[in-house]
């Protein structure tokens, strides 16, 4: 299964970490906006 494509795993890890970073920024932006507009 993991024979032909050895570079697949680091790319998936990088993409998932980028996704979690963007999600964290989005959540923080929502929290800050709700805090300031309250």
Image: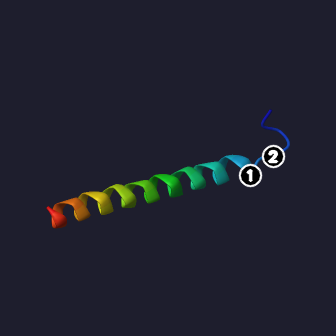
Q: Residue at x 25, y 64 (%)?
A: 33
The one nearer the camera, 4 or 35, is 35
Secondary element under disc 2, as helix, strand or loop, is loop
Q: CA distance from mark 2 to mark 1?
A: 6 Å
Q: Is residue 3 left or right of residue 12?
A: right
Which of the labelled discs sits on residue 7, or is there none?
Answer: 1
Check disc 2: other Cα within 10 Å, few if <14, some if 14-19, many if 20+: few
Which of the labelled discs sits on residue 5, or is there none?
Answer: 2
The one nearer the camera, 31 or 20, is 31
Q: Is residue 36 left or right of residue 28?
A: left
Check disc 1: other Cα within 10 Å, few if <14, some if 14-19, many if 20+: few
**In the rendered image, the vertical position of residue 7 relative to residue 29, given as above or below:** above
Residue ranking furthest to the front: 38
Pick the quarter of the image with the C terminus: bottom left
The one nearer the camera, 35 or 24, is 35
Q: Residue at x 74, y 52 (%)?
A: 7
Secondary element under disc 1, as helix, strand or loop, is loop
- Image coordinates of residue 34 in percent, x first then y, are 22, 59
Residue ranking furthest to the bottom: 36
Q: Residue at x 64, y 49 (%)?
A: 12
């Amino acid at each position: 299964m993991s024979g032909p494509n050895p570079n697949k795993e680091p790319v998936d890890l990088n993409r998932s970490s980028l996704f979690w970073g963007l999600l964290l920024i989005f959540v923080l932006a929502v929290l800050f906006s709700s805090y300031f507009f309250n």
